[in-house]
Amino acid sequence: MSQRARVSLFLALVFVVVSGVTAYAVGSAADYRETHERTPSVPTVSHPDQDAGTSTGPRILFRHTGIDESYGRVGAVSLDDPSGPRSFSDVSCDRLDATAEVTACLRTERGVVTTYSLTEYDADWHEQQRVAVPGIPSRTRLSADGTLVATTTFVSGHDYMQAGFSTATEIRDVGGRGHGDLERFALVMDGERVTPRDRNVWGVTFADDDTFYATVGTNGETHLVQGSLSARTLTSVADQVECPSLSPDGTRIAFKQASTRDGRTWWTPAVLDLASGERTVLDAERASVDDQLEWLDDHTLLYGLPREGETGSTDVWALDTRGSVPPRLLIAQAWSPAVVRP
Amino acid sequence: MYITLSDRPAASPAAPVAGRRRVAPVVVTLGLVSLVTDISSESVAAILPLYLTAVVGLSAISYGLVDALYQGVSALVRIGGGWAADRGGHPKWVAFVGYGLSAVARFFLLFSTGLAAISTVIAADRVGKGLRTAPRDAMISAATPPESLGHAFGVHRALDTAGAAIGPLIAFAVLWWIPDGYLTVMVVSFGFAVLGVALLGLLVPDRPVVERRQDRAPVRWREVAQPGLVRLLVVAGALGLVTVGDGFLYLALLDLGGFAAHWFPLLYVGTNVVYLTLAVPVGRLADRRGKAKVLIAGHGALLAAYAVVALSLDATASTLLVLLLLGTFYAATDGVIAALAGRLVPDELRASGIASAQTVVALARMASSAAFGALWFVLGPQQALVVVGGVLLLALPAAFATARGLDLDAAELP
């Protein structure tokens, strides 16, 4: 082939590739616009003044994940009728937690440089504070009185030759300052102060305004730690516990228990009794649950699972902690549930 | 010795030829191949964490370990790529296989779901990257007279790094336009990968580095182990052991509070911009003053970067200064070491020589990152940097003492 022919062939290929890629991108942009202009397929509250208790009464807030015009916005359903009509706020969150007064919202801020933020809202959805977080939103929890907020994000090396991920977990005063990365807290394992090189902390749940629980991952193992904000310590209390969630009565920890299936990590919901150390693995749930569980009441857990056949959409399921009753679908097209009892 | 190119002047680096400013067309073409290929790989790398967590729905912690493993595989495959290029005498086609493998991997990425499949595809991509690097650098070396090698590698690395800076911007622009457009980014990435392979296959001349003999002697590692190259491997390996990954420096800066966390991805872009700006001038400096001298002086910039972080003066100023120093460090080392290694072995072993140097540096830096991680937790970021910086400070004069000898070695081999 002559040089001229080669150049022509290359230019022809550039034309084919550029038009092919452009056509694909324009097509998927059009698809996106079309699916995200639909009205939700789930029942919604039609008038704000007839909100069926979704804005003031006992309620569940969540991220709406129906592929429609409200995708990603915070939805609310009445606690008495979780599958009933939902109302929407104008706020979008990837992960959220809420009390009657405060909502903590982790969000991906899209742009040419994509960033991530934690925003605190008051009961009327007025923004109170917005701070940058270092990575992709993973977990957030508020303390029961709404004075502390914890966030876990995935931090990734951006460069091609940079290895891997780690988690960054921080506790902040709501409306105030942070207490620093939990990785810097003194770590006490089996009664001994240790300083392992690889150490990740994730999934905080608050007991009161000083005590909290979290997972510490080190040397390929996970541990449940009890943390003290004032003493800046993390003390191990159990092994093999990920993403703890303290029950409303403060006696049990719900968590995801890891095992390996077909070479992949598989998480089963489980409950640990803090006083006796007894574990109950809730294998009535057949799917792998990668979520921080939320207590609906003293014997029911909530969590999100991918919605079958609909990429990007999820459902919130409810599972009884007392027996082998199969889980039930609680809120369709929802993620990151937060139970609010005013 | 076999003659590589008929027009190759036998001038030593000490006597630069005036007025020779342009690099061979093949160097620019190879630079453009790297540019589009880096757009392809970096655009996907930038969105992969988001994609894995948001769409595939995986906690991404385990990914980090796997990724570190592939870095090691990539470094070792590099030796194989260099050996194959020298053995067959057709570095272009070895590089082609490497670029092709990465393009095929990008195609399969379009259909991969689940961590296992995605990991496999990424592993194939890394193997491809490992394979192609040394043959490609050997081609740049073969097409360039010795006194312009620094310049030629500077031009190539500037183009390469420009691609690395553009890739993430394209990816995030696509996601801005189409919020769930991860697959679109992968299609774009595949498109760029195909263009890179086509550009190499069609427009880079297949000019064998060495004229083929009827029965070709196998590559002997003993011949690769020329005294000069061995000395370079020892010096570069030792310096690699005290080279802390820039991720750690950025984290230490973040710790100082010099910038909000969301600027973090921009630090890599900033370093890359400095690197691509300085690659050509620093390469030309290496041609005039000696490549080994510039290579080792580059580690002085690294030492200065450690000092700036450890001293923690004004946080914003420290951040900008560190980006400037790291960019200078890359400009003075990455291309320059390839330029130097290619001159320290006989022509027909050039790819193997370059591959050896790059592998030693990569493995030393991996070991250093692991060790530094441990120091970081025991001592804290700044004290850990003081320790590593102290060792580097002691090592630099010794390394510098070998530079003159290395530059003479590079000049002696034809």
Image (cartoon, coloured by chain):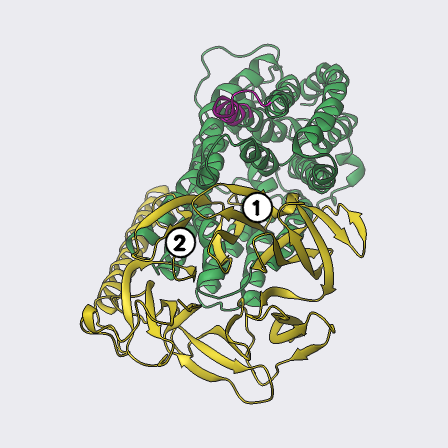
Chain colours: A yellow, B green
Amino acid type of the residue tagged 1 in the rendering: Arg
Above or below residue A169? Residue A270 is: below
Most extreme residue toward the bottom is: A325
Foreground residue, B271 or B252? Answer: B252
How far across and down, in percent of the image, does residue A6 sit?
A: 36, 47
How far across and down, in percent of the image, does residue B362 sit?
A: 67, 39
- Neighbourhood count class around disc 2 (C-alpha, 10 Å): few under 14, some 14–19, many 20 upward: many
With B337 as the anchor, is A196 left or right in this view?
right
CA gap, disc 2 to disc 1?
40 Å
The chain identifier of the residue carrying mark 1 reads B
Q: Residue at x 43, y 22 (%)?
A: B22
**Which mark is drawn over residue B339?**
none
Prevailing secondary structure of the magenta residues: helix
Amino acid type of the residue tagged 2 in the rendering: Arg
Q: Name the residue under label 1.
A: B132
Q: In which quarter of the image is the C terminus of chain A?
A: bottom left
Q: Name the residue under label 2.
A: A107
Foreground residue, A286 or A150? Answer: A150
With B79 as the anchor, is A144 left or right in this view?
left
Q: Which residue is drawn at 49% across and 73% down?
A: A303
